[in-house]
């Protein structure tokens, strides 16, 4: 089940955990939204979804940090 949640979440990166849960329910799986959210959060780092490797972010303190 965990692999299916991660697969749906990564193949459809704009979907939230509620949409992933809805698709799982449509496929006949009973699972809570909280479980889907926890699995997706553990599998995907928020920074890696929005930033390209090697890009930098401003830390708000006058310095930048390189993302990799």
Image (cartoon, helix red, strand yellow):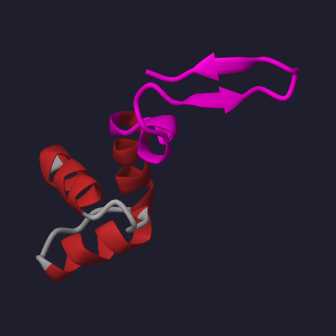
Q: Which residue is drawn at 28% across and 57% down?
A: 9
Along the line of sight, the residue nearer the viewer: 17 or 12: 12
Of the pair 46 and 16, the residue shown nearer to us: 46
- Dividing the picture into quadrants, the one containing residue 32 is bottom left
> In the rendered image, which quarter is residue 20 located in?
bottom left
At a point 41% along the width and 62% down the height, the residue shown is 17
Q: Split into 4 quadrants, where in the image is the C terminus?
A: top left
Q: Residue at x 64, y 18 (%)?
A: 65
Magenta region: 43-68
Magenta span contains residue 46: yes
52 sits left or right of 13 in the view: right
Residue 7 image offset from top left, x and y in percent: 17, 53
Residue shown at the point (39%, 35%) measured from the top left: 42
Label total for image: 0
- Picture coordinates of residue 29 (x, y %)? 16, 69
In the image, residue 57 sits, relative to residue 22, either above or below, namely: above
Residue 14 is inside the magenta segment = no
Question: As rendered, which of 54 and 33 lies closer to the eye?
Answer: 54
In this rendering, the answer to whether 37 lies above or below 67 is: below
Is 50 placed above or below 47 here? below
Give how far across and how far down residue 36 sits, in percent: 35, 55
Left or right for 46, reference 33: right
Residue reaching furthest to the right: 61
Residue situated in front as seen by the camera: 30 or 58: 58
């Amino acid at each position: 089940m965990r692999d299916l949640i991660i697969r749906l979440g990564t193949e459809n990166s704009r979907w939230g955990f509620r949409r992933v849960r809805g698709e799982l329910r449509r496929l006949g799986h009973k699972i809570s939204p909280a479980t889907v959210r926890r699995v997706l959060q553990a599998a995907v780092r928020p920074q890696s979804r929005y930033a390209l490797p090697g890009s930098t972010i401003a830390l708000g303190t006058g310095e930048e940090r390189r993302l990799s």
